[in-house]
Image: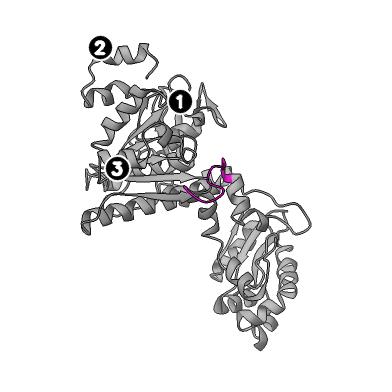
Amino acid sequence: MDHQHSATENQSTDMQTTELPLKGVRVLELGSLIAGPYAGSILAQFGAEVIKIEPPGSGDPLRKWRKMYKDTSLWWYSQSRNKKSITLNLKSEKAQKIIQDLVKNADIVIENFRPGTLEKWNIGWEQLSTINPKLIMLRVSGYGQDGPYSSRPGFAAIAESIGGLRHLTGYPDRAPVRVGVSIGDTLASLYGVIGAMMAMHHLKNNNGAGQFIDVALYESVFGVMESLIPEYGMFGFIRERTGASMPGIAPSGSYTTQDDRYIVIAANSDSIFKRFMNAIGRSDLANAPDLAQNDGRAKRSDELDIAIQTWTSTLPLKEALAVLENAAVPSSGINNAEDIFNDPHFHAREMIVEHPLSESDTISLPGIVPKLSLTPGKTKWLGPKLGEHTEEILNSIGIDAENVELLRTNGVI
C-alpha cells in the first residue's frame, strides 16, 4: 500500500488555519512515564507550549522503554511530540527557584509525583498558587492527594486491579489478566485533560480562581466500570470474568472462523439481531417472538452463540465479514499492528502518519485524536533530545548564557 498520502498530518486543513486551539497556553510538565506526561502530550498536540522538566543525565525513564531507535525509545518520540525539554534537578534549591519563576507565566502545571513530594521541594500547590493565583495544577497519583492510601506508590497495573478492571478481564476458569496497554495511566491522563479544560473555562468565563485537579489512577479506572457498583449495591451481585462474551447483552462476542481467525460480532440491538439471523440463514431465530428484545435473547444466549459459531465455522474471516457488512451487522476481525498498519481506513483518516526521524528513516505515529474541524491538532516535531530547550527556557526568565553554564557546572541543570 502506498502510504505517501499520510506523510503530513492534516494537509487539507493546514491551509485553512495557522492557529491551534491552545495557542498561548503555557504548561509546565513535572513527572515521568505515562499518566502525567500523556496529558501533557495531548495539550501539546493542540498548540500548548509544554515545557517538560526532566532530571539531568537520565531524563524521563520513558526514553528507554520498549523498542529503541538507536538510543531512544520510539514511544518517547510519539508521546513527547511538540514538547520542549529542560533539565532541572528539582532537589536543588536553585532549580526550585527556577520552577517558581516559570510558574509566574504558566497556565497549567502537570505533575505525577507521589503526594507530598513537591511540597517537600517547596513547589507544591500552596507555594505555586501563592505565586500565581490563576494557576491550574493537574495532580495525578495512584490513590489521590488524601485518604489512607495516598502515600502508597501506584502504577497503572495496581490501579486497574484496585479499580475493578483486572477482576473482569480474562476467562472465568483462569487467573485475571491485564489489558495489553497501560489503560489506567491513559484514562487518568484523559480525565486530567478534561479537568484542566473545565478549570480553564471556569477561570476565564466565570471570574473564577485557579485550582488544582486531583486525579487518582484507581478512580480513573473505577469511573468507567459501568454498572458494577449499582448491581452490587442493589442485588449483592458481583460481576465476574466472562471471556469474550457480555452477559445480559446478546448476542455479542467473538467467534472462530473457518481459517482459524477471530470475528467479533455485536448484534445485540433488536433490528440488527433480526437482520443478522436472516443473513446467516436462521429466520427461525429472527422471527422468534421471545428473541425480539434483549432480555429474551439474554436467556437464550448460549443457544444463540452455538448458532453463530456454527455459521462462522463455515466461512473464512473475509467472507464472513462481507456477509455481515452487506447485512449492516457490526463486525470485525481482531486487528494486530500489521492489520492496522495496512488498513486503508486508518490511512484515509490520517490515523497513521509518517514523520522524518533521520535523513534515512521515518517513524509512523498514531494520528491525533480528537479531530477538530477548524483547528485540528498537529505534530510539529518529535519528542525532543534531553535538555534540548534548556537554554531557551532559562533565557526567557532572564538567565543568561554565563549563568546557564554555571548552573550546569553545579549540577542544577
> How far from the left and from the top, in percent, is residue 59?
46, 25
Residue 400 versus residue 53 in the image, above or below: above
Q: Which residue is mark 1?
A: 59
Q: Is residue 251 left or right of residue 376?
A: right
State the residue position of label 2.
402
Task: Tell me the quarter of the picture where residue 108 sits.
Answer: top left
Q: Is residue 148 magenta?
A: yes
Q: Earlier in the sequence, mark 2 or mark 1?
A: 1
> At 61% from the left edge and 52% from the top edge, which residue is drawn?
162
Q: Is residue 62 left or right of residue 18?
A: right
| Closer to the eye: label 2 or 3 | 3
Which region of the structure is painted magenta?
145-156
* Quarter placement of the C terminus: top left
Which x, y percent locates residue 20? 26, 45
- Using residue 346 as the reference point, say whether residue 225 is left or right of it: right
Of 373 and 327, nearer the camera is: 373
- State the residue at coordinates (58%, 49%): 159
Circle 1 — which element?
A: loop
Determine the CA span between mark 2 and mark 1.
23 Å
